[in-house]
Image (spheres, helix red, strand yellow):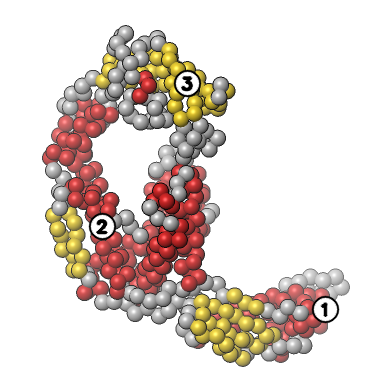
Amino acid sequence: MQVKETVADGLKREFQVIVAAKDIDAKVDERLVDLKDKVRLNGFRPGKVPVAHLKKVYGRSVAAETVDQMIRDTNTQIFTERNLKLAMEPKITMPTEEKEIEDVLAGKTDLSYTVAIEIVPPIALADFKTFKIEKPVADVADAEVDEAIKRIADQNRPFADKGDAKAESGDRVTVSFKGTIDGVPFDGGTGEGIQVLIGSATFIPGFEDQLIGIKNGETRTIKADFPKNYMNTDLAGKAAEFETTATLVEAPQERAIDDEFAKQLGLESLDKLKDAARERLRQEYDGLTRQRVKRLLLDQLDEAHRFDAPPSLVDEEFNLMWNSIKAEMESLNKTFADENTTEDEAKGEYRKIADRRVRLGLVLSEIGEKNKINVTDDEVGRAVIERARQMPGREKEVWDYYRSNPQALASLRAPIFEDKVVDFILELATVTEKKISRDELYKEDEEKPAT
């Protein structure tokens, strides 16, 4: 085998490879000898088929398989000997002339091909003991627990019939309606016994407001436009009319927050309800703190590891992001001008984000590899179970989906791996706590989206 490096440009490498015809022919003979004991041909006893006859029958197909395997093995040897880590699958350029291909398969001519690759640059990892992370911590105040319980009470408050009184904001109105667009009924435009909470913004804009003042038994025509980004594109942006009749108008009643209320929610007492609300808030705050700490750590990793990311990986990441952004903007009927930018400026910003993501991904991978950080099958299995729990009644469907879809399983494995690497670094870094308010914690989370 002869290997000559013909291109070494940045992260791009290209090699000219020649594999001698005699080596190919020897490998073909080895495979045919192995095949002799496995094939059955008329006129020959098992294991007694001459290799020369096998070569006539299977020679070309065996040669093709052999050449393919030799290319893979040769490429692996080239990359291993030079300690090259590939960013993408290698691009192989083979002979194009049919006669040349036939001569290679027949063992008459040496195999000559080129292999082009893009490599991951060597990454010198930082000393993580020098990292300093300020961890924002917000305590759960009694007032916040009371607010949370009040929200629960408001969501579970009873309603009482108002009789002939007019509906007001905050009232619940039970209606039946028939919708039309340009006088023509449309799918999904009819409803019977639908409860509408005025002011909840659960119906299309304008619908709820026009119920204010309606009385039980009254019929009125409500005019409202479907939003331009409405999920049903056939209705998006269109003006509709709804012939609407109120069959019940109810006013919200106060909900006593006491032991009885807690029992209705399945808890023993109001104190137990407060404990549950406090724990849920604690988990929510811990989640926000974790996001913040992770973001700060990734920022430091980004600053500490500056190198040229493989262009093909950056392009791939950018294209995924850009296609998603374009689809979202189209669904919302937005333009870049609406965001006070231009398409070129937006592309530049997202390309920077793509470059950062690729570099951080490579750094995290390097840290994991150097420190033998792996994700176990049990950890992935627990993640699948958690996903299944989020879809009651469809657990088996979720389980079967992940079991038969390696790519989906990989999508679960990646964040687990990332979190384990982050935890590894945090063990080495100096982490100090900083007490902040709940509002500050939420503000930090809103101001700095993760990238």
User: Which is nearer the eye, 331 or 389?
Assistant: 331
Could you tell me the amino acid type at mark 3? Answer: Phe
Residue positioned 32% across, 77% down in the render? 125
Mark 2 lies on a secondary structure that is: helix
Relative vertical location of residue 10 with respect to residue 375 in this rendering, above or below = below
> Closer to the N terminus: mark 2 or mark 3?
3
Q: Which residue is mark 1?
A: 56
Where residue 206 appears, x then y in whole percent?
A: 39, 27
Where residue 382 appears, x then y in whole percent?
A: 38, 53
Could you tell me the amino acid type at mark 1? Answer: Lys
Mark 1 lies on a secondary structure that is: helix
Q: Quadrant of the C terminus?
A: bottom left
Where residue 438 appears, x then y in whole percent?
A: 18, 47
Residue positioned 28% across, 23% down in the render? 170
Badge 1: few (under 14), some or many (20 or more) residues near its Cα, within 10 Å?
Answer: few
Alpha carbons under labels 3 and 1: distance apart: 80 Å
Badge 2: few (under 14), some or many (20 or more) residues near its Cα, within 10 Å?
Answer: many
Considering every residue shown, the one lying at the far right of the view is 43
Whether pointer 2 and pointer 3 mark residues with C-beta atoms closer than 8 Å, the reply is no
Alpha carbons under labels 2 and 3: distance apart: 47 Å
Residue positioned 39% across, 65% down in the render? 352
Relative vertical location of residue 216 with respect to residue 437 in this rendering, above or below = above
* Circle nearer the viewer, 1 or 2: 2
Relative vertical location of residue 388 with respect to residue 363 in this rendering, above or below = above
Q: Would residue 244 be seen by someone viewing this image from the given angle?
A: yes
- On screen, residue 237 versus residue 300, left or right, reads right
Q: Which residue is mark 2?
A: 292
Q: Which residue is mark 3?
A: 242
> Closer to the N terminus: mark 1 or mark 2?
1
